[in-house]
Image: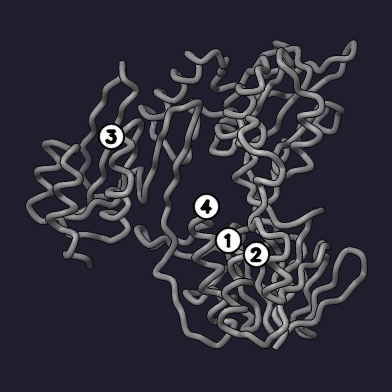
Amino acid sequence: MRHVIIGSGPAGVVAAETLRKTDPTSAITLLHGEAGVPYARMTIPYLLAGKIDMAGTRMRQQPDHYDRLDIRLMAGLARTVDSAARKVVLEDGRVLPYDRLLVASGATPALQRIPGIDLPGVHTCWTLEDVRTFTEKAKPGTRIVQMGAGFVGCIIMEGLVSMGVDLTILVRSGRMVSRMMNPIASGMIRRWCEAKGVRIRVNTLPKELRSAGGELRVVLDGGEELPADMYLCLVGVKPNTGFLAESGVAMKEGILVDASMRTNIPEIYAAGDVAEFTDCITGERMVNAIQPNAVEQGRIAALNMAGKAATSRGTFAFNVLGTLGLLSYSFGAWQGLAGGESVELVDEPRFRYLRLEFLEDRLVGANMVGFVQHAGVLRGLIEGKVRLGAWKQRLLQDPTLLMQAYLAGAQKVA
């Protein structure tokens, strides 16, 4: 059996390791799209902040890890997938035949479609090569205008502030991390960042970038121009699926998969940031691009590729964000569900916030800032679909009683 995995992020690496453990004799090829060995993209902020070196970014620290497992690590990018002939054609013309294929190709940074986006001094910060290029130019006092304050934008901010740059962040919407935090929680994060010296401008969008006198000029909608040495574009990512255009693989926002991570083509599977599957709380299809889901989907896909039945009960939205020392979390249906109830606790001076969302007698979502001790309990209650019974009313009166509710109801799982 020939297994080919496109992508060497968490989903791809875990899938390769699971395949080898489950299927000791089959050929496994792990296609790695960047120079060097597979690394963890989530370590980039720590690299920027100087907390780790390049070696610390590696997904697996042992130099011979893949050789010992007889996993063929191949550098290259997929150009096309021929599902009828069961082969992957690489950008350099090489061909990889397969019996089972896993697409775990991750995501690609999105770029704004504005004049000047291709000027020198415009950067993303998604790969190790991006970091090398960026850190060669960014020094203490360097004027950086960053577009975007989503999850990626906020974790990159940590490294930038550690570098001592002069940072201005533009936010298109009215709030930071709007896809994981409600307005109150987002407002706390914004005020925290501003207190740390970061300038944040909401409801602001550049209409073009210009180069003048050796510096960039970021031209805003109203005509104001912000001078900058560098412009950092962090406006989100999109599933990296362009090479599947002629493959026949069904896609919407991402690659459509079933509970076994199989696509509409029986020999092709998908996992991680490219996979679109149902959310375990809402039942809606979505691309849930977080590492825990990628790891679990890679494992499930590999077991099925090796002939072992395994299924997912659905993805779970679980985001943990550290922003200049302030921890925030979102779980499940944090916006709430129709017909549900909610309760919140706000402590503005201490940057503490807790909001719980209920449907019937279950906790279905939460937003949290500063309440670090409740993170594991919240995840267990929500993802475990624990029936709270009388504890629902107690939590509506005092949302800090989460541990007591968990201990009382941990065995009552749907």
Percent position of residue 14, x then y = 58, 66
Q: CA distance from mark 3 to mark 1?
A: 29 Å
Q: Nearer the viewer, residue 103 or 33?
A: 33
Question: Disc 4 marks which residue?
Answer: 290
Mark 2: secondary structure: loop
Instruction: Please tell me the numbered disc located at residue 238.
Output: none
Q: Residue at x 31, y 34 (%)?
A: 371
Percent position of residue 303, x then y = 53, 79
Q: Residues within 10 Å of mark 4 (few under 14, many from 20)?
A: some
First of labels 4, 1 by sequence position: 1
In the shown orientation, is residue 328 left or right of residue 86?
A: left
First of labels 1, 2 by sequence position: 2
Q: Amino acid at mark 1?
A: Gly
Q: Residue at x 71, y 74 (%)?
A: 71
Percent position of residue 206, x then y = 69, 23
Question: Disc 2 marks which residue?
Answer: 104
Q: Residues within 10 Å of mark 2 (few under 14, many from 20)?
A: many
Q: CA distance from mark 2 to mark 4?
A: 13 Å
Question: Disc 3 marks which residue?
Answer: 354
Q: Residues within 10 Å of mark 1 (few under 14, many from 20)?
A: many
Q: Amino acid at mark 3?
A: Leu
First of labels 3, 2 by sequence position: 2
Considering only vertical position in the picture, is 85 above or below 162? below
